[in-house]
Image (cartoon, rainbow, N blue to C red):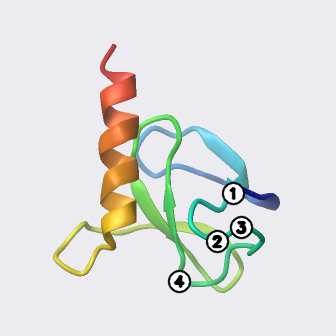
Amino acid sequence: MQTTRVPGSRCHVCGKRHSAATATQRQTDQPSPGDYAVCFYCGAVERFTDTLQLVPVTLDADTPTEVLRLVRAIKARTRH
């Protein structure tokens, strides 16, 4: 997995600041506009804009399975 610095933004749910992104499916890719992001702290799902800022999204039938798995894992971890 590769971690990449991105312009700082705050999670729209918990307010934690994010300044890096780690790819979970692709080994070397940097985030691209439209890619999903899952907040490491609360499990909120967001997407990268053209300037790699994060904007909130709603989970629906089109949300990739891998994103849903990450959300479940993070939320399970934060319940302890």
Give the residue at mark 1.
21
Location of residue 33 with respect to 77 vertically, above or below:
below
- Along the viewing direction, whichever of 5 and 69 lies nearer the viewer: 69
Q: CA distance from mark 4 to mark 3?
A: 18 Å
Q: Residue 41: x and y, percent?
A: 50, 35
In the picture provided, is 79 more to the left or to the right than 23? left
Q: CA distance from mark 3 to mark 2?
A: 4 Å
Mark nearer the viewer, 2 or 4: 2
Q: Residue 16: x and y, percent?
A: 58, 38
Q: Residues within 10 Å of mark 3 (few under 14, many from 20)?
A: few
Q: Earlier in the sequence, mark 1 or mark 4?
A: 1
Q: Residue 52: x and y, percent?
A: 68, 74
Give the residue at mark 2.
26
Q: Are marks 3 and 2 in contact (CB under 8 Å)?
A: yes
In the picture provided, is 74 more to the left or to the right than 9? left
In the picture provided, is 76 more to the left or to the right than 10? left
Q: Which mark is residue 13?
A: none
Residue type at tag 1: Ala
Give the residue at mark 3.
27
Residue type at tag 2: Arg
Give the residue at mark 4.
34
Q: Earlier in the sequence, mark 4 or mark 3?
A: 3
| SS for callout 1 | strand
Mark nearer the viewer, 1 or 2: 2
